[in-house]
Amino acid sequence: MSWTKAEFKDGEVWAECDAQGRLRKTKGKVRIAYQTNAKKFYSTFEDRLKVIDPSDVEEWASAKGRSKADSSLMGGVPADLGNVDHFHLWSDGACSGNPGPSGAGTVLIDRDSVREWSTWLGTGTNNIAELTGILQGLEALPEGTDRTVVIHTDSQYCIGVLAKNWKAKANGELIAQIRAVLAPLPKVVWHWVRGHEGVALNERCDELARQAIVRRTTEIT
């Protein structure tokens, strides 16, 4: 099941869509929810919804141009983790079906510098997409860096297999690759973020991952 953000009445909802981001109708109506992990769903006519283009996430568009001194860029981060002299790696993965078409989104903040990845992965699982989102950010860190890296993710699975020694039943090669990149870093801090709760950079990574699925392309900026 895939979801896209849409305007509905005076607010925003998540609307069920296909892998290309088109609204999916059942008996003439589109299923909607106020959170993607909601247990209660509603339905409405397609003409009452306006899909929000992933490239038009207003909150991020305004934040990306701000300086490191603007704390709103790091909204949702505890004060003790928000040190602007750390590297901040935000990531997310998306999958239409599991397995299914998948993408990874990453934002890497290096003081005033911001880089983004929207990576098309082909057919894969959600866990592969989540792991890849972390890996591509880690691989972009300067070689030999002596600075702390804070990894922000909504994936308990990634934190478990990479930081808590959970036994991985799958994706062993990918996990080993990430652990090898993590090993020489002087300090890594893991920060779990509750997904789809309006945390700007977490939402942006989700949008980047879904963009990759819709466009079937990889874009790095």
Image: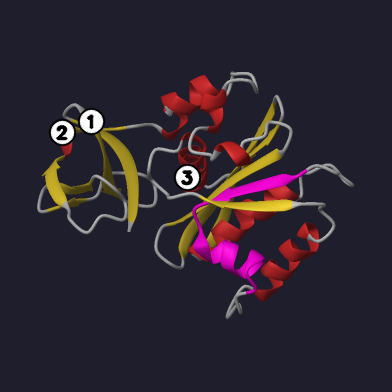
Position above or below: 61 against 38: above
Residue at 58 percent of width and 21 percent of height: 70
Query: Does the image show residue 20?
Result: yes
**Residue 172 pos. (x, y %):** 67, 75
Position above or below: 8 against 90: above
Position above or below: 149 against 49: below
Mark 3 to mark 1 CA distance (whole Å): 19 Å
Residue at 65 percent of width and 65 percent of height: 163
**Residue 176 pos. (x, y %):** 73, 70
Query: Does the image show residue 104?
Result: no
Q: Is residue 162 rendered magenta in the image? A: yes
Question: Residue 10 versus residue 118: which sits nearer the camera?
Answer: 10
Question: Residue 48 versus residue 142: which sits nearer the camera?
Answer: 142
Q: Which residue is mark 2?
A: 47
Left or right: 195 in relation to 139: left
- Mark 2 or 3: in front is 3
User: What's the magenta region?
Assistant: 148-165
User: Considering only order in the chain, which callout, 1 or 3, is on the residue closer to the N terminus?
Assistant: 1
**Residue 123 pos. (x, y %):** 52, 63
Mark 2 to mark 1 CA distance (whole Å): 15 Å
**Residue 122 pos. (x, y %):** 55, 58
Left or right: 99 in relation to 218: left
Mark 1 crowd level (few <14, some 14–19, many ≥20, 10 Å Cα): few
Q: Is residue 155 rendered magenta in the image? A: yes
Q: Which residue is mark 3?
A: 206
Q: Which residue is mark 1?
A: 11
Given the image, on which type of amino acid does mark 3 rest? Answer: Asp
